[in-house]
Structure formats: C-alpha cells, structure tokens
C-alpha cells in the first residue's frame, strides 16, 4: 500500500493522534507560548526574520488550536479501543471484525499485558509489520492476519522471520483468527516465532479483558527474550553472538527454558538456564 505524500505538519498531527490526548495539549501550549511571548523578543539580524516574526505572532492562537485537533481524536481512539476489547465475547465476534479493528484489538490486548505498543498505520491489511511491542528492553514485531477461511502458510512466517533480523527484533508474533498450516508450524519450531491462532487468540483477549495493565507476560509469551543482565555469560562461547533464553517446544524438556545462541540455526550452542553447558553443536 503506497502512502500518499504529506507535509511535515500533517506528519506531526498524525503522530499526535497516536499519542495520549494530553500530549497534544502540552504541544499546543508550548507552541502558543513560543510564538506569542518568546518569538517577539528575539532580535534577529536579518530583516526577513523580523518580518516573519511580525507575521506569525498574531496567528499564535490559531496555530496553537491547530495542534489541539489531535487531542479529541486521540481520546476517541483510546475509548474505542477499550470498548472494542470489552465487547468481544468469543472467537466468532473477533472474526467478524474489520482488519483494522482486529489490529486495534490485538494492540489493546498487549497494552493490558504491560507492553508498550507502537502501531504501524502506514501498512495495508496484509503488509509487513502491523505492531511493534516492547517490554523489559525486549522488542517484538507482530503481524495480524484476519483470516478465518484460509490458513496462514509458511511464506508469511518466513517473510516475518527475515524482517525480524532486518529490524533487530528479539522475536516475531503472528496472530490469526483462523489457523496456521502444519508447514508454517514446522518452520516456526525452535525459532523465535510465536504463532497464535483462533482459540489461543480468544484466550489472549479473554485474559486481557479480566486484567488491568500489569507487568506480566501475555497468554503465550514470545519464545525468546534477551538473557538477563545478571548473567555473566551473555556471549556465546562458540561464535560470540548474544545468548538468549528460549522455551523448548517439544521433547522431554517441552515448556522448559534453556539458553541458546541468537544466531541459531547457524550456531547450535545450548545450555540449561542457570546451569552448565549440556550441549554444544559446531557451527554449520
């Protein structure tokens, strides 16, 4: 989806609509004070600056009001997100949402879990990164797929995995109101990719409805996060890359955390979380 060209002022106003409503009030007040009281006291050497100041100062109030416009839009957006979250009853109501409302819903659910959420409003319904969520210095990219008739295939998962490396994120979360193909699930296995489908999504929303924003992980936490700062061996002894905490998805240790190399599968160094090395494979 190609974005139309906008002016710098439009970009700032758009940004303010994404911020809490009071940010627009603060920006508007600061602009008014600058134009009305500070700018006239400046004595520029060039006449053109003095003339410009004389032209702008009388319009300080109008310009300040312009930057107040995003405030009610932001407040309405915040109210809409909260009511959208509360109104969901099951996976069927979630599947009936428009793709944009679906993204709003997922964003609000992660906010309830204590994440800082940045929405990518420039993208279309099926393009790239829809959300970026951050918590405890960890950053994850999220793609929302409002698909319930067609399964999400491995191509989507591969593309997001590549994007994760290009934006230096710690993991990927792909959320669909439907299902993933088995090939997609196989590809995501043992990678920092979390696939959330139908019933798991409904559980995530239900959990968000019953909680206030707190510092707790989501229903299905991303499979990777940075190694805690208290650990001394933060670098992989095999290749020198960052060590990260993973969650085993299968086998006798399924569900348990272990420490592995962030460059997996290129480097397969692993060791128990908090213990000594129990396995190390040479780099491919």
Image (cartoon, rainbow, N blue to C red):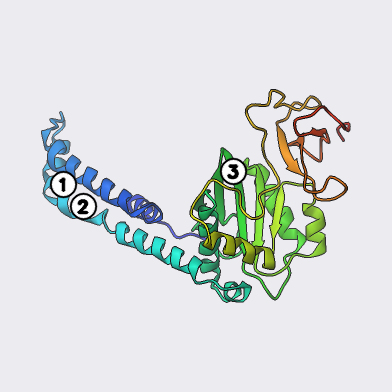
Residue 283 falls in image quadrant: top right
Spatial distance from mark 3 to mark 1, Cα to Cα? 42 Å
Tell me if I can see residue 90 in this picture.
yes
157 sits to left or right of 113: right
Quadrant in the picture for the N terminus: bottom right
Task: Give the answer, above or below, for where 174 lies relative to 282.
Answer: below
Q: Disc 1 on helix, strand or loop?
A: helix
Tell me residue 50's x, y (percent). 13, 37
Numbered disc in front, either 3 or 1:
3
Residue 227 x/y as whole percent:
67, 33
Q: Earlier in the sequence, mark 3 or mark 1?
A: 1
Residue that badge 2 annotates: 63
Which residue lies at the image location 82% right of the left edge and 35% below the top edge?
A: 267
User: x and y percent of residue 133 in the render?
Assistant: 56, 49
Marks 1 and 2 in Cβ contact (< 8 Å) = yes
Disc 1 crowd, CA 10 A, few/some/many (<14, 14-19, 20+) = some
Can the viewer see residue 128 in this picture? Answer: no
């Amino acid at each position: 989806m190609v974005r139309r060209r906008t002016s710098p002022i439009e970009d700032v106003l758009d940004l303010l609509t994404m911020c809490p409503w009071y940010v627009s009030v603060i920006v508007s007040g600061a602009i008014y004070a600058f134009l009305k009281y500070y700018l006239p006291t400046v004595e520029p050497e060039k006449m053109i600056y003095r003339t410009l100041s004389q032209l702008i100062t009388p319009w300080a109030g109008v310009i300040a009001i312009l930057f107040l416009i995003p405030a009610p839009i932001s407040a309405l957006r915040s109210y809409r997100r909260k009511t959208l979250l509360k109104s969901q009853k099951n996976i069927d109501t979630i599947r009936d949402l428009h793709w944009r409302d679906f993204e709003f819903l997922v964003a609000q659910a992660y906010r309830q879990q204590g994440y800082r959420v940045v929405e990518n409003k420039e993208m279309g319904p099926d393009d790239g990164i829809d959300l970026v969520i951050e918590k405890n210095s960890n950053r994850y990219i999220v793609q929302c797929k409002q698909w319930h008739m067609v399964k999400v295939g491995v191509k989507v998962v591969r593309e997001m995995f590549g994007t994760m490396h290009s934006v230096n994120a710690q993991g990927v979360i792909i959320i669909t109101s439907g299902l993933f193909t088995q090939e997609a699930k196989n590809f995501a296995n043992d990678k920092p990719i979390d696939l959330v489908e139908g019933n798991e999504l409904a559980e995530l929303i239900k959990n968000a409805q019953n909680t206030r924003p707190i510092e707790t992980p989501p229903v299905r936490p991303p499979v990777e996060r940075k190694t805690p700062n208290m650990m001394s061996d933060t670098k992989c002894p095999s290749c020198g890359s960052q060590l990260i905490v993973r969650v085993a998805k299968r086998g006798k240790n399924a569900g348990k955390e272990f420490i592995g190399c962030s460059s997996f599968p290129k480097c397969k160094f692993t060791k128990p979380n908090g213990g000594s090395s129990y396995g190390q494979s040479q780099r491919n």
